[in-house]
Amino acid sequence: MELKENQSALILETDEHGEISVNVASGDHDGLTAAICTALAKKLMGDESFQGDIMGMLEEEKGTE
């Protein structure tokens, strides 16, 4: 996927051990979208409470299927 100059994206990847890594791709690394994605990536990787919230949401989704 090619990003336009005003777009950014979070890229989530799992390794063979189930560990998740988060990367930011951006058409403009100094722009607002890149800053937001970078902030989200930092929160995803460094905030255990936020990680727990996300895992809880995934479990809820799994339970409604």
Image (cartoon, rainbow, N blue to C red):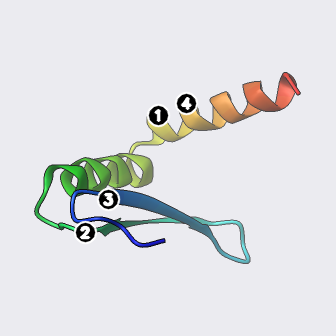
- Mark 4 sits on what residue? 53
| Image coordinates for residue 2, horizontal then vertical, percent | 41, 72
Instruction: State the residue in front, 9 or 39.
Output: 9
Q: Nearer the viewer, mark 2 or mark 1?
A: 2
SS assignment at label 3: strand
Instruction: State the residue in front, 8 or 65.
Output: 8
| Image coordinates for residue 28, horizontal then vertical, percent | 18, 66
Amino acid type, mark 2: Gly
- Mark 1 sits on what residue? 49
| Image coordinates for residue 32, horizontal then vertical, percent | 15, 49
In the rendered view, tell whether residue 22 sits above or below residue 50. Answer: below
**Badge 4 vs badge 1, beta-carbon distance below 8 Å:** yes
- Mark 2 sits on what residue? 27
In the rendered view, tell whether residue 63 sits above or below residue 18. Answer: above
Quarter assignment of residue 55: top right
Amino acid type, mark 4: Asp
Left/right of residue 29 with respect to residue 22 in the rendered view: left
